[in-house]
Amino acid sequence: MKVLILAGGLGSCLSEETTLKPKPMVAFDVGIHKETIVHRKNGCLIKSGDFNSFANELNFLKNHPEEANIIGMHGYELYKELTSEEMFKNKLKTIFK
């Protein structure tokens, strides 16, 4: 099972592999992660610096591939929503008002 470990913001995962192959995200609860990721719904959110929980979440995803796939698909939908053309248009409208 492949996972996407987010060290920066969600925008840092703008790679071709990410956009073409949904996979569960694992991130610490900092920055935009704590505002957008719902634990075990669209990713795995770990308390900042809690490396034991981080390892436990990786094991959970490895041992529960069906749930990991569902989490990955929900995370992919979040990614598409946050990077959609419509979202960028709305953001620009609010910036330039």
Image (cartoon, rainbow, N blue to C red):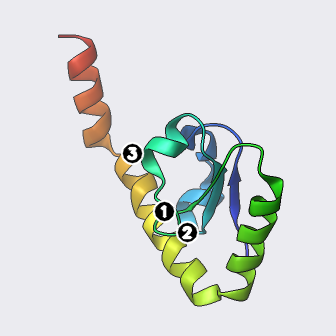
Label 3: few (<14), some or many (≥20) within 10 Å? some
Q: Secondary structure at mark 2?
A: loop
If you read the primary sequence from the N terminus, does the residue marked by circle 1 or circle 2 appear first? Answer: 2
Image quadrant assignment for residue 5: bottom right
Q: Secondary structure at mark 3?
A: helix
Is there CB contact under 8 Å for labels 1 and 2?
Answer: yes
Q: Amino acid at mark 3?
A: Leu
Q: Position of residue 50 (x, y in %)?
A: 77, 51
Question: Residue tagged by mark 3?
Answer: 82
Q: Amino acid at mark 1?
A: Gly
Label 1: few (<14), some or many (≥20) within 10 Å? many
Question: Residue tagged by mark 1?
Answer: 75
- Front one among 6 and 53: 53
- Front one among 12 and 60: 60
Would residue 35 appear left or right of 59 to someone viewing this image?
A: left
At 51% across and 72% down in the image, what residue appears? 71
Would residue 28 appear left or right of 75 to someone viewing this image?
A: right
